[in-house]
Amino acid sequence: MLKYPDNFHENQKIYFEYLKKKSWDAILNYAPPMISIPYGTQCNAFCTFCQRQTNPDLIPDDNSLPLVIKSMEKFMKLSSSVYLSDWGEPGVAKYFTRVVNKLNSLIEEDVTVGFATNCSKLTKSMINILFDGKPRFVIISLNAFNRKDYFEVMGIDAFETTISNIIYLINCKNTLKENINLNIFISIVLTSQNYNKLLNFVKLAIDLHVDGIIIEEFIQFHNELKHLLINKKHNSIHKIYLKSLSFAQKNRLPMITVQNSWYLNPPREKSDIFWCEEPWKSFRVNSSGDVFPCCYLNYSCGNVLKNTPEEIWNGKSYKMLRQQWINDDLKSSCLKCKKRWFPN
């Protein structure tokens, strides 16, 4: 198996054509460009938009995680990037140091390593452990610009502590800037409750001197969270987004949108193609070894403790999902995701 090609989009078109001719029997001879590895199994926050069962009193702990990491060693070396995450705060996870040290060794294999955190319990000693591996990016789930909104969104009263930890992270980066190439981002999940405060979030990012903002759209899969969806009655969102983007650009702050959301772009024609790259590029593993092609899908494509990552990557579930996209025959979560981009 080859390392993921740099000119992925060109190769991707070739694979699409091949898949159309050969159905779902085609083999992808490159490793997934993005592999996500967990810190643990639980989160220390209780975000209003989170669609997983979490408990702020539970500490991440899963005895199978070291076996999961071991089974992924060779596969991770073939990837372009490995993303260390699992919703919430990594530092409270039982195997934090062991997992981080393992990923730090990937730097020598020319793999881009990054990590996600909400930064609320990331102590200075934990930050120093992370910096030992010279990560390329840190994504901090902040979601609010003040203490009141942070508590309402994140479910924990830790805004000041989080900001303090972010400042410490940035100071560490500036101290090591000759020896480390690190980008620090703060992220926000846009919902019906906070989209009108996006400009305030941009101003906070500028004050913190982070390297950029990542904007994600809330995509609802459970009816009890339907009220958080942004829809056409929130007709001011496009103006708010453009104003925030303009302000960020004037201050040379990158503002990255993860999804190509309908309200951020000109109207689309019905003939436009909506395509998801996740089945061709993502390999997300949880603490039990289950593999998911996307953070929204709630079914596993396999388990790395039962099959090799290579077998799963070219296994029945992954190939069936790719074929559904080619045939435009989407099921469940994928169909809901598509409808968010094409609401009409």
Image: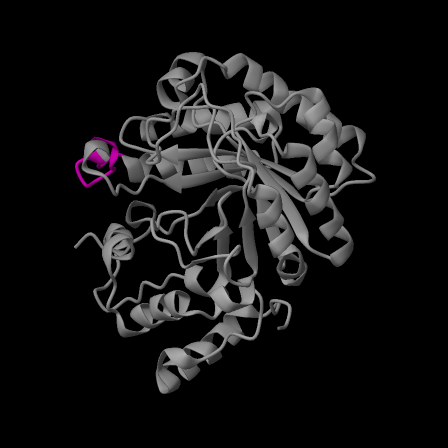
Locate residue 29, reporting x and y percent: 56, 75
Residue 54 lies left or right of residue 96; in this view the side is: left
Point out the stretch of residues depicted in magenta.
Answer: 226-236
x then y, percent, for residue 234: 22, 35
Say which quadrant the C terminus sits in.
bottom left
Q: In the picture, which quadrant includes the N terminus?
A: bottom right
Asked if residue 207 is positioned above or below residue 255 in the image, the reply reads: above
Residue shown at the point (32%, 36%) measured from the top left = 51
Q: Nearer the viewer, residue 237 or 219?
A: 219
Examine the structure image and report whether residue 51 is included in the region drawn in magenta: no
Where is residue 154 drawn, in percent x and y?
41, 22
- Residue at horizontal 74 percent and vertical 28 percent from the top: 128
Q: Is residue 108 left or right of residue 63?
A: right
- In front here: 161 or 300? 300
Image position of 324 with respect to 95: above or below: below
Looking at the image, how many numbered discs can be counted on the residues? Answer: 0
